[in-house]
Image (tube, rainbow, N blue to C red):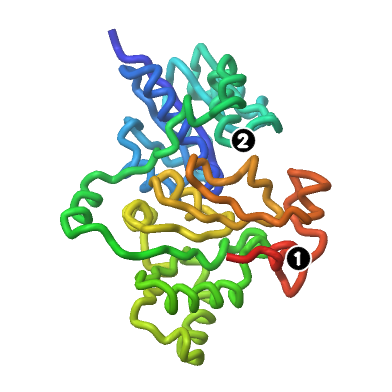
Amino acid sequence: MPAKRIVIYRQGAIGDIVHTLVLVKYIRKQEPDAQIEFCCGPVTAELLQNCCDYIDKVWIINKASFEADFAKVGRSDEFIFLHTQWYKAWWINFRHIKASKLFCYKYNSKLSAVANYVTARFPQIETELIKNPYAVLDHRTLVNQDLLQGVQEQGLRNYICIVLGVGNLRPHRAYPLTKWLEFIKTQIKDTNYQIKILGGPDEKDLSLEFEAHLKQDTELQSSRIENLIGKTSLVELVVILSQAQELYSADTGILHIGAASGAAITSIFSITNPNRFGPFSPDAKVLASPRCQCQLDSGRKKHCTKLKDGFAGCIWNISL
């Protein structure tokens, strides 16, 4: 008898995809013999192919060739659509997947985003997820054993990681560079850690600005600083973060890769609701201003109402 085939679909930013992987790993635990396949965009496909051994196949779905790409996926027993557009889920299933069981994500403000994805397929465990999600779900969903073994053979790394930016989407969520520089100076002065600066390929300007500060400020002129902004693949980030002493980051995709890689985390949140979108890791520390008006008004706001010098006003009150 052929294995049960389960097809899962989610498009979005890196953090959005990483949040869904907890569900996928839970499905593998419940259905060890199933054929589990994940449909996503090209940016995250390599990450899933190389760091998720519980996924049997990854399908790349491009926006420009959406219908044609789904036509290649073919029939399955289950189709799990991790967006709220039920009509779109029904149409894709009717046209291409033809699964007898169709599941569609529904927004639930009582749960974290991770737990909310899980209840799209397993609504019966909602109460357990509210009480203690880490007793039910495995937060470490990204591992590359081959690359990791090579690193471990060389010994553990004596370094911390810092993510300076948050990409181009709502950049006011970032921690101000001036405050990062203050923190880096204390690390240079008070510790012997190497400092790896991380970021995406769309943060070239931020990287250049940071490099300019390194040249101009004598307190920052240290051989212990390594600027890796835009120089690593997502798979390489998994290895770097899994071996770090700690990761410091605002709410961005690398933060969630770190949580899924098992990194120790200190995260900084402003307008984004940390209870909903915070790093899914039992040991993660979350720093947020209790006076954030956007958070008090609504946990679903996407834009700060009180900017200061281009950043969320409340974030200036947060100190590392």
Determine the residue positioned at 59% across, 46% down: 278
Q: Please tell me the numbered disc located at residue 112.
A: 2
Whether residue 48 appears in this view of the structure is yes
Q: Amino acid at mark 2?
A: Ser
Q: Nearer the viewer, residue 115 or 31?
A: 115
Q: Residues within 10 Å of mark 1 (few under 14, many from 20)?
A: many
x then y, percent, for residue 152 = 21, 53
- Between the residue at mark 1 and the residue at mark 2, the CA separation in whole angstroms equals 25 Å
Determine the residue positioned at 52% across, 41% down: 280
Query: Is 316 rendered above or below residue 75?
Result: below
Q: Which residue is mark 1?
A: 313
Q: Residues within 10 Å of mark 2 (few under 14, many from 20)?
A: many
Query: Which sits earlier in the primary sequence, circle 1 or circle 2?
Result: 2
Q: Nearer the viewer, residue 203 or 285?
A: 285
Query: Is 111 rendered above or below residue 103?
Result: below
Q: Nearer the viewer, residue 32 or 197?
A: 197
